[in-house]
Amino acid sequence: MLLSAHQPAYLPWLGYFDKIARADIFVYLDTVQFEKNSFTNRNQIKTPQGVLWMTIPVKTKGHTSSSLSTTEIDESQPWRSKHLKSIEMNYRKAPRFVECFPKIEKLLNTPESNLAEYCFQQLLFWLREMGIDTPVVRSSELSIASAKSNLVLDLCKHFDARDYLSGAQGRNYLDTDAFDKAGISIEYQSYKSPVYPQLWGDFVPNLGILDWWMNTNEKFL
């Protein structure tokens, strides 16, 4: 069995879904710590002026010592309407805009104030859209309290996974000796974004899924 895992992400890039599609089971890491300036609560779309970050504001008090499962969205800011306006302005000429915009409008307006839960509901939507049926388990549903490399190793042991698919950054923190001793092999993801029709000039890779979804009918798998 091959296991992969990742923290919640807003409008994830295609490589996020590659990790899920290639795995036998995917663990949604909603118990790890919130990281400022990560892709957990923000991602990029393309505009005539270049890429634009769209960020979900969060209540920052105490977030450096709490997990994503308790990180709350700052609903005092009108971020949902701003994001939808940016999407409409920059993708209304996209081939699938008429089909897709009502879906993203409904998705972004989901009345959920917990960041991890909000991103989880979005993840389920994207998996359906992309035809990915890999089982997804939330780390908050498991009784595993370890962190970083030990967390990943314990997840593999819990599911009796013999292989772990890691992101490229795993090279910086995974204890490979511990994995070797446990008889678990590590594969590091090396994902290259497909080139697809895109608005606004030269192709820009690795944007959030929204760009690919709006611009092409290509199958992901």
Image (cartoon, helix red, strand yellow):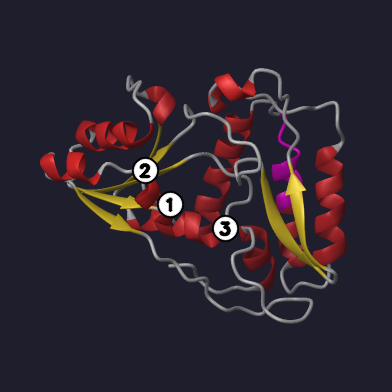
Q: Which residues are magenta?
A: 104-111
Q: Secondary structure at mark 3?
A: loop
Tell me whether circle 1 and circle 2 mark residues in contact (CB < 8 Å): yes
Mark in front: 3 vs 2: 2
Helix, strand or loop at mark 2: loop
Q: Which numbered circle lies on residue 100?
A: none
Q: Residue at x 37, y 43 (%)?
A: 173
On screen, residue 100 above or below 62: below
Q: Residues within 10 Å of mark 2 (few under 14, many from 20)?
A: few
Q: Is residue 176 left or right of residue 108?
A: left
Q: Which residue is mark 1?
A: 169
Query: Distance of mark 3 from mark 2, alpha carbons?
Result: 22 Å
Pointer 2 residue? 173
Residue 105 lies in magenta, yes or no?
Answer: yes
Question: Identity of the amino acid at label 3?
Answer: Trp
Determine whether label 3 and label 2 are within 8 Å by CB: no
User: What x and y, as percent, mark residue 184?
Assistant: 17, 46
